[in-house]
Amino acid sequence: MKTMNHIALLSLGLGFCMTPARAQDTGPSATGNERSPLQVAQRGPGGGGPRGGRSGGSGFQSAPLAKDEAEKKILDALEEMSRGGLGMSAPRDDARLLRLLVESSGAKHAVELGTFRGYSSIWMCLGLRTTGGRLTTFEIDKGNAATSRQNFQRAGVESLVTLIEGDAHQEVSRLKEPIDLVFIDADKEGYLDYLNKLLPMVRPGGLIVAHNINASMADPAYIKAITTHANLETLFINAGNDGISVSMKKR
Ligand SMILES: C[S@@+](CC[C@H](N)C(=O)[O-])C[C@H]1O[C@@H](n2cnc3c(N)ncnc32)[C@H](O)[C@@H]1O
């Protein structure tokens, strides 16, 4: 471990980065030669891993790896979706962070404001299928809702998702069950209203994640609310470069 850290630091110093996903690639090769436990990758503008991800601020990047066939089917569907361009969808690593938060927190009920084509929804489903949870996602545009439904089928996650069509500012009143994680990614000026309406439904210890929290897009009123509310612990993250806030509702 010490050696790996040493190699990583040395490589960063030389202007290169390691690919952690290859850290498993240890042991002797078929030819009997020792292989390096880490593969050195050129640091490029925005990274660009095997699935086209960006490296965030660290210079390191990792590619999603399927543990089994079920995960592979979903990752393949996500890869297919990203081939024509992700458009308004969250960058891959922002969406991966959602999966990580959903799965590690054992979330049973995630709520998303702004489905678009279902890209971030499907990433959350990767976590929800292992926690026994489900997603409620809101989309105002009929065409986007229809495309999302097709994508949920393609990924095989349709049984985990309830898609509610309409203006989420009104439609969230249909939510009756406690929420473990909220992902806010719809109209940027509406974030504070979503927070005010949904925070009472978030269970203690639950998370409110907001996307596009950067200088040009974030609503200052939302930033003020999540940084001055004594019942929230908030951090700002730059996973895929668009900017994310993660706020935990204190217990
Ligand atoms: C940035 S996209 C969502 C991307 C998606 N979360 C992803 O990462 O794959 C924003 C979406 O919010 C939807 N939207 C905007 N205002 C809305 C509202 N008031 N209620 C519900 N959806 C809304 C838009 O139609 C659009 O599809």
Image (cartoon, rainbow, N blue to C red):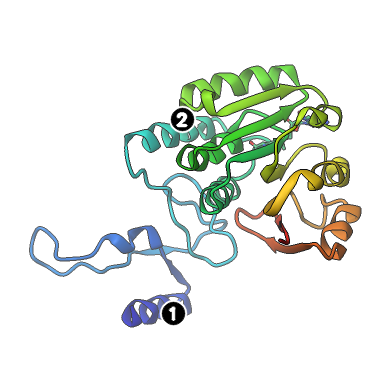
Q: In this view, does 2 lie above or below 95?
A: below
Q: In this view, does 146 lie to the left or right of 20?
A: right
Looking at the image, which residue is at 36% across and 78% down? 7
Front residue (pair 45, 182) = 182
Q: Earlier in the sequence, mark 2 or mark 1?
A: 1
Looking at the image, which residue is at 51% across and 48% down? 103
Which mark identifies residue 24? none
Q: Is residue 183 left or right of residue 9?
A: right
Front disc: 2 or 1: 2
Which mark identifies residue 9? 1
Quarter of the image with the N terminus is bottom left
Question: Is residue 174 among what the camera can see?
Answer: yes
Could you tell me residue 102's position as x and y percent?
Answer: 56, 47
Looking at the image, which residue is at 14% across and 61% down? 29
Q: Is mark 1 on a helix, strand or loop?
A: helix
For label 2, the residue is 77
Looking at the image, which residue is at 63% across and 25% down? 162
Q: Is mark 1 within 8 Å of ligand 1?
A: no
Residue type, numbered disc 2 = Ala
The quadrant in which residue 236 appears is bottom right
Front residue (pair 195, 109) = 109
Q: Is residue 47 left or right of residue 38?
A: right
Quarter of the image with the C terminus is bottom right
Ligand 1: quadrant of the figure: top right
Residue type, numbered disc 1 = Leu
The quadrant in which residue 248 appears is bottom right
The quadrant in which residue 4 appears is bottom left
